[in-house]
Image: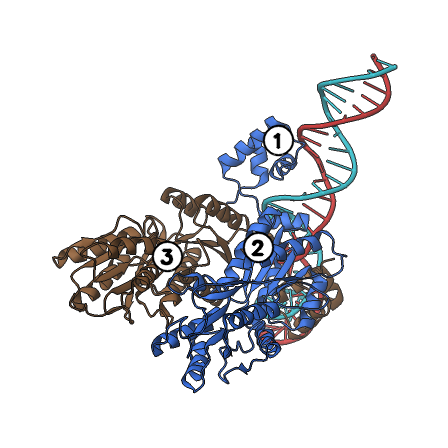
Chain colours: A brown, B blue, C cyan, D red
DNA sequence: TGGTCGTGTTAGCGCGCTCTAATGGAACCC
DNA sequence: GGGTTCCATTAGAGCGCGCTAACACGACCA
């Protein structure tokens, strides 16, 4: 059925070991033999068996990447960048989806361990920190989008991102700035805390609806309704992410509020969504590609030198000002 | 380093073969021994080596899924559904990204072949048909979103989808219905042809701008500008996909046209984008989950019985009417 | 001519597992 | 009690490959 190195060797008239050397691009094979082997391999349609290779070499040259969902456009940019960077380093990437559920994530991780990946990237993991540390004892692990002590980490500085957003609104002259909370989503608590601290530092009141945005459009709508239908409604909203910001935009549109004249809105993540002309949402940029690149680079570094001390790398976000923010009209 | 069945067997006081039986959930193992083995495995932190298993069994119980991009929300729904369905059937899914480029796709396929996947799903593949047929001779292959003779295929009936969209606009009373073309994107030509035929059947004129939408927002903007800035501009636009429809919405918004009062817009794919409250775009639904489910089911069927004749399955799309379409105001 | 070196090639072990065939008992029957 | 059946358990071969150590052979030097 399957063509093996044995078959290729027979056809090329050499030993099996030589075929193995050619496949691994060893420099100490004569040009003539190399060519003969490659021709034979081509004629037979030989495809190296990666499983046999792993078994013999104990390496797979692949990294496992566990993400919570692929729908998330930020995540897909991380994935893309990680794959590109991994390929440069000679690694492949094995993707697994955690589906926001620790049990599913655990299964995904186990599948990857079964495949003996050389390293593991956990992006926005929902697993308990202890479990992640245990895992890191078995295999090189990198956590992205979250901080876990004792394990390599790459994350965005949510605190300074939130501060950027709020200060932008303050500088425009807004006094009543509300926040749509992200619930227990990754980074949501930090974003809310930074929002409160920044307002406090400027002597302004915080306003957070009881309804949580939960990083969803539906949540954003509910929260925005609570905010905008009350008296003394805010002139600006800082949403914990773009999706809930879009919920706020939808509510404003339905209520006949003009954006940005009557209401300013800032999102978080700078997803492709916010970049659509039709949306044009001011948003805090999550440098997705940078996260992916740095994650792979750091993990490969650990694979090469497992003894080094754990590193934490924080990326600084930037604000992308678009057309949903402006100075408040005198209401 | 790595814990093996040998180690587990030693600790549990049984033979290695019995450990193997327990791991494969064989029914003919006594409850007591099973428990002893599982306990020993747990204590040692044993993780089965999938590579060794493949080598010995010659099966991987995984399907390879090659997609062109993950950004595409339709694709991610296909992926999600495929994974779920595969899991039900006892298979895992190995994902690879083709990046719209045949060379990249070819490498992705070869990686999957190296991993000896039991079957291959090519979604929106860019490979030549001949090459796909060659591939199908080596391994069970299913093509999604495109038709290839002699190979199992799952696709959406673009023709009837486009007809649905256009007839919806005609029934609302529109006479000047334009189309934003999808260029060489998958299904774009069929959609445009069906658009023309449907209008013709109703004795109405077709109007397609020279600027192609190319399935992008930018393209949709350019095409819509060409359409709406001219005299005798359309009262309705049928865009080849949601993204270019959003481009049209952006132009309408900038020009101060009210949607749907002044302009109706229909998209294609029913992506999450169109479902946002803020967008609320009437769109033709691509049953992404159904595609994924049917693809896996058909492929598993072929794996189980490789001799069966190739099947082609066409899925019928439906129109999701939202708030971007209405009867034309008497302009 | 004999020895040393370097280069290209090969023999063969073992990676961790599955699976077939064989083994050892317990249970049962006459 | 000897034979038969049946079942849980085990021995052992082999999956395709990487890699170490050994090998052949010509070039080179003394």
Classify the position of the C terminus of chain A by image quarter. bottom left
Q: Position of residue A253 (x, y in %)?
A: 32, 64
Chain bearing tag 3 is A
Residue at mark 1: B14
Is residue A61 shown to the viewer in this render? no
Provide the residue designation for mark 3: A217
The x, y position of residue C16, in whole percent, is 59, 45
**Residue B40 visible somewhere in the drawing:** yes
Number of dots carrying numbers: 3
Residue at figure coordinates x 42%, y 45% from the top left? A137
Q: Residues within 10 Å of mark 2 (few under 14, many from 20)?
A: many
Secondary structure at badge 2 equals helix
Distance between the Cα atoms at labels 1 and 3?
A: 56 Å
Q: Nearer the viewer, mark 1 or mark 3?
A: 3
Give the residue number, with chain letter if any, for mark 2: B82
**Alpha-carbon span between mark 3 and mark 2:** 25 Å
- Whether the residues at callouts 1 and 3 have beta carbons within 8 Å, the answer is no
Say few, some or many: other residues with alpha carbon within 10 Å of mark 1 (under 14 / 14 to 19 / 20 or more): some
């Amino acid at each position: 059925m399957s063509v093996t190195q044995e078959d290729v060797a027979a056809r090329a008239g050499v030993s099996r070991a030589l075929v193995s050397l050619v496949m691994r691009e060893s420099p100490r094979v004569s040009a003539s033999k190399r060519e003969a082997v490659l021709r034979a391999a081509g004629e037979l349609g030989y495809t190296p068996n990666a499983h046999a290779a792993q078994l013999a070499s104990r390496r797979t040259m692949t990294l496992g990447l566990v993400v919570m969902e692929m729908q998330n456009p930020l995540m897909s940019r991380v994935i893309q960048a990680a794959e590109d960077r991994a390929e440069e380093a000679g690694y492949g990437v094995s993707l697994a989806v955690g589906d926001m559920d620790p049990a599913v994530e655990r299964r995904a991780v186990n599948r990857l361990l079964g495949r003996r990946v050389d390293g593991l990237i956990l992006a926005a993991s929902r697993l308990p920190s202890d479990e992640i540390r245990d895992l890191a004892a078995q295999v090189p692990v990198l956590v992205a989008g979250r901080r876990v002590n004792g394990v390599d980490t790459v994350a965005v500085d949510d605190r300074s991102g939130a501060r950027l957003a709020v200060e932008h609104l303050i500088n425009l002259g807004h006094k009543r700035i509300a926040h749509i909370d992200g619930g227990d989503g990754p980074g949501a608590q930090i974003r809310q805390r930074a929002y409160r601290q920044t307002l406090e530092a400027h002597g302004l009141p915080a306003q957070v609806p009881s309804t949580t945005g939960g990083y969803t459009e539906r949540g954003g709508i509910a929260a925005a309704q609570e905010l905008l239908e009350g008296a003394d409604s805010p002139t600006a909203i800082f949403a914990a992410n773009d999706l809930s910001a879009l919920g706020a935009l939808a509510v404003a549109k339905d209520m006949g509020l003009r954006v940005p004249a009557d209401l300013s809105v800032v999102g978080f993540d700078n997803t492709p969504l916010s970049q659509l002309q039709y949306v044009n949402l001011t948003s805090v940029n999550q440098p997705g590609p940078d996260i992916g690149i740095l994650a792979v680079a750091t993990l490969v570094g650990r694979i090469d030198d497992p003894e080094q001390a754990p590193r934490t790398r924080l990326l600084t976000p930037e604000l992308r000002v678009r057309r949903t923010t402006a100075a408040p009209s005198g209401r």
